[in-house]
């Protein structure tokens, strides 16, 4: 299934027929971020002061919420261990998936955290921001590794594809970086 969101609702689409399968309504704010769990059983939705949890099968039942006081969620990423939320208030909030408890705040951006992506190993996080930067974080020690200042305007999206990190910005450019994930760290080559 494909999931899309807007003000107060989430739509579920069949990928083969491109037809609408289900609408999840009744949310009380903009839904700006969605992420599916790695086992594909849960959908997480990022709203203002809450993260919703939904079943991805059957009637797409609401399984609960992760309440928080971090403002609007603009981006979500997931590993086997963590749910990670990029917020309007410039920080990245890390929640433990086993109990939905907040475990850490990653601070370093000075603008909205617009996009998040995790390396296949789950050990590193890449974030982008309206502050024109891309940051790489070590999720084992929750420390920043590298900050990239390669765009002339806010960075709206980051994605990992094979050995490449791609970033899209309001400066009308897409940048391509080659990355290397080593046992002891992470390196980017431009």
Image: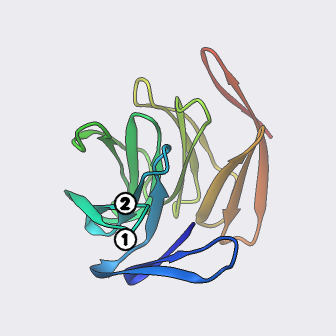
Q: Which mark is residue 188?
A: none
Image quadrant in which the N terminus is located: bottom right
User: Image point 78% across, 37% down: which residue?
Assistant: 163
**Residue 69 vs residue 2: left or right?**
left
The crowding category of the residue bearing disc 2, from other C-alpha atoms within 10 Å (few below 14, some 14 to 19, many at least 20), is: some
Residue beneath disc 2: 55
Q: Which image quadrant for residue 104?
A: top left
Looking at the image, residue 179 lies above or below residue 167:
above
- Asked if the residue under mark 2 is in contact with the one under mark 1, i.e. CB atoms within 8 Å, the reply is yes
Q: How many tags in the picture? A: 2
Q: Is residue 113 visible?
A: no
Point out the frontmost of discs 1 and 2: 1
For the point 61% across and 61% down, the residue is 157
Residue 128 at x, y percent in the picture:
55, 54
Q: Position of residue 43 (x, y in %)?
A: 41, 59
Quadrant, the C terminus: top right
Q: Is residue 5 left or right of residue 121?
A: left
For residue 92, above or below residue 120: below
The residue closer to the viewer here, 20 or 159, is 20
Secondary structure of the residue carrying tag 2 is strand
Give residue 79's position: percent from left, percent from top.
Answer: 47, 39
Q: Is residue 2 visible?
A: yes
Secondary structure beneath dot 1 equals: loop
Give the alpha-carbon distance from disc 1 to disc 2, as whole Å. Answer: 8 Å
Please state if 71 lies on the left or on the right of 35 as rendered. left
Relative to 30, residue 105 above or below: above
In the image, residue 80 sits, relative to residue 114, either above or below, namely above
Mark sitting on residue 59: 1
């Amino acid at each position: 299934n494909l999931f899309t969101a807007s003000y107060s609702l989430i739509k579920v689409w069949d990928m083969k027929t491109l037809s609408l399968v289900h609408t999840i309504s009744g949310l009380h704010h903009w839904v700006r971020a969605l992420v599916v769990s790695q086992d594909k059983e849960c959908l997480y939705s990022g709203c203002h002061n809450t993260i919703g949890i939904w079943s991805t099968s059957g009637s797409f039942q609401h399984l609960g919420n992760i309440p928080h006081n971090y403002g609007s969620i603009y981006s979500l990423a997931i590993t086997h261990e963590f749910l990670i939320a990029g917020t309007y208030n410039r920080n990245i909030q890390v929640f433990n998936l086993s109990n939905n408890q907040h475990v850490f705040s990653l601070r370093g951006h000075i603008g909205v955290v617009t996009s998040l992506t995790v390396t296949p190993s789950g050990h590193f996080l890449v974030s982008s921001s309206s502050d024109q930067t891309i940051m790489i974080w070590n999720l084992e020690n929750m420390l920043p590794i590298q900050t990239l200042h390669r765009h002339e305007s806010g960075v709206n999206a980051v994605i990992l594809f094979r050995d490449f990190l791609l970033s899209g910005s309001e400066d009308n450019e897409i940048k391509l970086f080659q990355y290397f994930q080593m046992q002891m760290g992470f390196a980017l080559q431009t």
